[in-house]
Amino acid sequence: MGISVRTAQGRSYAFWASIERQEVMETGKRHWRWQEDGMEVVRSIARTAPGCHSGCGVLLYVKDKRLVKVEGDPHFPFNQGRLCPRCQVLPQVVYNPDRITYPMRRIRAKGEVAWKRISWEEAFEIISMKLLDIKERLGPESVIFCTGTARDLPYWIHRLAHSYGSPNTTCWGPLYGAACYRPKVVLQRMMMGERAVADCSQFFPDRYDNAEWKRPGCILVWGNNPVVSSADGLSGPWIVECLKRGSKLIVVDPRKTWLASRADVWLQIRPGTDGALALGLLNVVINEHLYNSDFVREWTHGFQEMRERVQEYPPERVEEITWIPRDQIVKAARLYAQSKPGSIQWGVALDQSKECIPTLQ
């Protein structure tokens, strides 16, 4: 049983450098803006706006100072011209008539739909006065500063909290995501020393042609639908490219997604029973000795205790818990364990379950 991983740090700089080198060699100059069919095309990276962990190259088509459409940049190695729906519908998001682009104040009791538009100055005044009042009456430690995943915002939340005098911030590094993403990242660093994502060649400018890259023998997609969402720093088309090159696919999902319909093994799980499935898969792997015993001996801790624990979850019992046929559980365990290298791409469905931490471990 093997795993193929790489860290994601510093990839964007290498990709931009590769683009510049390629264009300079081919045309002698770089193109960042040009005219096409009566529109101005602006090359950029869509990261913060759609809201994801990647950084896909996009071509923004602008007419009369209005964003008309968004297409993928075919010369950007990271996404190679492919985009998920979040980028493609960006014009609809930007110009949606229901999008709130100014502060609003509630003018009725909480729970009633009644809002009034106010100025930015008034909004800042209301917020600052309430914060100062709380600080004076209860002390700065009484306030906790937190955000959603927020991408680039947590750094500024830290500064706000420190200037206010509160040590209470739930922001972590460049991201937050306590209910979606942070649990898996923290546990990966605890268990393996660093976070990992499936290696679908996203770390090489020349992508699938790079001599150092080896396609995954099997990709296990668990609680994730990357073809639609492209979440957690992994784009669905990368998995499709790996499948074209011979990678096998296992999908754990109660829904028959596009990937599930093309999987070698689709494990249609009963929602909320992921931990039992994981123990059942380990039961097969351990009892059939489908693991690297040298690696276990040299680099793991607690393996014997885990061996004893998984005996409580034979495939027959796991079938009753998860509603997945026993034969499918055994087939998936054997396929993944005997595929080298193997890659697991898990989604936030696991982070958002009440059994989050033990399941992810």
Image: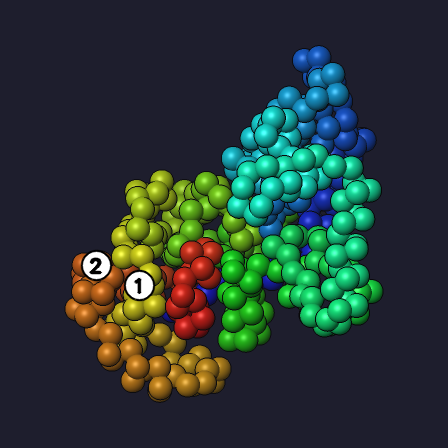
Mark 1 and mark 2: Cα distance apart in space = 9 Å
Quarter holding the C terminus is bottom left
Please give the label number shown on residue 273. Answer: 1
Residue 227 visible to the viewer: yes
Residue at the spot of label 2: 323
Q: Please determine whether, in this image, residue 6 is positioned above or below residue 85.
A: below
Percent of width and height locating residue 328: 22, 58
Q: Is residue 315 left or right of residue 297?
A: left
Residue density around tag 1, few if under 14, some if 14–19, many if 20 or more, within 10 Å? some
Q: Nearer the viewer, residue 173 or 245?
A: 173
Quarter holding the N terminus is bottom left
- Asked which secondary structure carries label 1, the reply is loop
Residue, x 19% and y 70% (percent of image)? 317
Percent of width and height locating residue 117: 70, 34
Q: Earlier in the sequence, mark 1 or mark 2?
A: 1
Q: Nearer the viewer, residue 49 or 113?
A: 113
Percent of width and height locating residue 211: 56, 53
